[in-house]
Image: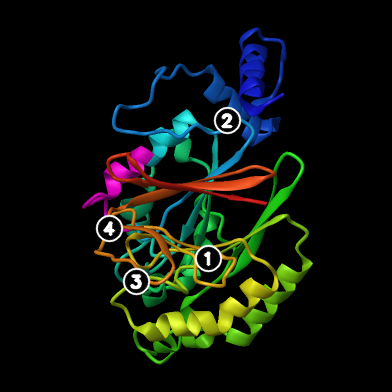
Amino acid sequence: MNRRNCLKALSAFFATGAIGGFSASAANARADRAADRAATVYSEAPAPSLEVPAIPENNLNFILANDLGRNGYYEQKPIAELMGSLAEQIDVEFVVAPGDIHHFNGVASVDDPLWMTNYELIYAHPDLMIDWFALCGNHEYRGNTQAVLDYGRKSRRWMMRSRYYSKYFELENESVEIFFIDTTPLIERYRDKEEKYADAGLQSIEEQLRWLEAALAASKAKWKIVTGHHPLYAYTTKSESERADMRKHVEPLLNKYHVDMYLCGHIHNFQHIKPLGSDVDYVVNSAGSLARKVQPIDGTRFCSDNAGFTLFSLSDAEISFYMINGKGKILYQYTRKK
């Protein structure tokens, strides 16, 4: 039974009272959410401004969103609403948020009001009350990075428990593993600025790279995706040393362990780059609030200076992604098969 049919069956099950004295507190949280979704009447068509791709019902879907925190200003709030509207139409399971949730100086504590104005009150759509797998970006490193880790004690959906970690997800018969890496400490220009990015220089590059290699080597997943805040390849006016450091530390491991995609943000525009001779798809996701200009470089398959987010949809045989702008238009889509 596919997921949508399962939701319909759950809805009928609840509606007929077939479970008698069933205790909601004992129910699986995912089943509760699925039943609630199935019992809710949505419009037959999505909002006119939102293009919804044709997604097979059994696919695993997630949203990539980063460079968010502008207190709802610029395009942040409208884009957040589009994310929620998309999640109404298809089964989005989680959000990957690789950094800069808080511009410009991170947060001071788990009680900092920025958690409300940058995050909780902006991504308040009911269908965004799902797991958010987050990372620190360079702006989090300007503040209290431990508070970013600890926020999961206050927010059920904030799933960041470590500076770097991996998550394994099952597909129909295969699986995908996503490896979340902490990129700011891998870049020397941040480590050199002790006053501005104090925590960056305290993190061990060698320890993280040992973890990443061991995790990639041990993975049995068919699909391997690595995500971090900073790009290895991208057009940007930011210092070339950032990308050079990332390539030095990370690219050999991506190639050695046949990673399929590297996902990042930081640059505030959409880019899909496939360097000559590389088998890795490098995906730069735009800002969820305020975008910057962009132009092609060697290996560019697509680029756009629109703000927005990216939808990923995975099956046993392929990964597809859809870059969606702040007006809900699909600017670009790509499928990788294996």
Callout 3 crowding tier (Cα within 10 Å): few <14, some 14–19, many ≥20? many
Q: Which residue is mark 1?
A: 149
2 or 4: mark nearer the eye: 4
- Image location (x, y in percent) of residue 185: 49, 81
Q: Earlier in the sequence, mark 4 or mark 1?
A: 1
Q: Secondary structure at mark 3?
A: loop
- Image location (x, y in percent) of residue 213: 70, 76
Q: Earlier in the sequence, mark 2 or mark 4?
A: 2
Q: Which residue is mark 4?
A: 305
Callout 4 crowding tier (Cα within 10 Å): few <14, some 14–19, many ≥20? some
Q: Secondary structure at mark 2?
A: helix
Magenta stretch: give its range: 69-82
Q: Which residue is mark 2?
A: 33
Q: Earlier in the sequence, mark 3 or mark 4?
A: 3
- Residue at 55 percent across and 60 percent down: it is 160
Q: Which residue is mark 3?
A: 235
Location of residue 269 with respect to 233 vertically, above or below: above
Judging depth in this view, the residue of 89 and 161 nearest the camera is 89
